[in-house]
Amino acid sequence: MSILADHQIRDLAQGQNMIEPFVESQKRDGMISYGVSSYGYDARVADEWMVFTNVNNALVDPKNFSPKAFVEHKGDHCIIPPNSFALARTVEYFKIPSDVMVICLGKSTYARCGIIVNVTPLEPGWEGHVTLEFSNTTPLPAKIYSNEGACQFLFYKGSEPCEVSYADRSGKYMGQRNVTLPRL
């Protein structure tokens, strides 16, 4: 298994529509960077947010998750309360080939501010907008900017396609278009 370089990511994005919309080079211009990097792709966070709240006294239960645990927000940024959490999604829609596995890491700009970005691996054959989890580990409110870089995806190519892909087993998060809450 080897990590894909910028030109290989570009080839898959253009030839197989692996990332849409696709930004061919890193963009900065006073923003948190996004687009292709040396060995990854820096994805943007969309302007749709679900911020954790306890206003409805909800219980967090992954087997019976209540949408009452969140308030919805749409805007050019999101303020995450101290020691709290928010969900969002990528601007980009991903279609992962059956011989590629994708790992996501947070961007250093947010990490240095105490913001942790968590994403589970994108499995071979999966497609959709990626639901992003932002944790504010600080005792202060934290601002996250919509339509700017939020995380970096690293693409690993297997020596051959897997026998059973995420699509083959009809994974429960296949084809998601919005911020997606836990499912059983």
Image (cartoon, rainbow, N blue to C red):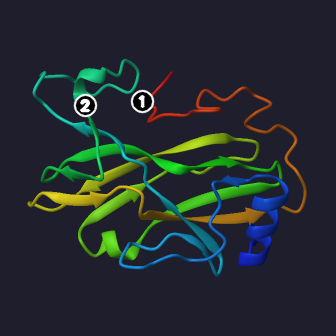
Percent across and percent down for residue 133 are 38, 48
Residue 1 makes an appearance in the image = no
- Contact, mark 2 vs mark 1 (Cβ under 8 Å): yes
Residue type for callout 1: Leu
How would you rate the neighbour count of disc 1 (Cα within 10 Å): few for under 14, some for 14-19, many for 20 or more? few
Q: Which residue is mark 2?
A: 70
Q: Quadrant of residue 153?
A: bottom right
Drawn side of residue 30 relative to residue 114, left or right: right
Drawn side of residue 71 relative to residue 102, left or right: left
Helix, strand or loop status at disc 2: strand
Drawn side of residue 82 relative to residue 137, left or right: left
Helix, strand or loop status at disc 1: loop
Percent across and percent down for residue 119 are 48, 51
The image quadrant where one finds the N terminus is bottom right
Percent across and percent down for residue 68 are 24, 22
Q: Residue at x 29, y 46 (%)?
A: 75
Residue 62 sits above or below residue 80 on the image? above
Q: Which mark is residue 80?
A: none
Residue type for callout 2: Phe
Residue 115 makes an appearance in the image = yes
In the current view of this chain or complex, which residue is farthest to the right? 160
Q: Which residue is mark 1?
A: 181
Residue 54 sits above or below residue 108 on the image? above
Residue 82 sits above or below residue 50 on the image? below
Comes first in the chain, label 2 or label 1: 2
In the current view of this chain or complex, which residue is farthest to the front? 29
Q: Residue at x 25, y 39 (%)?
A: 51
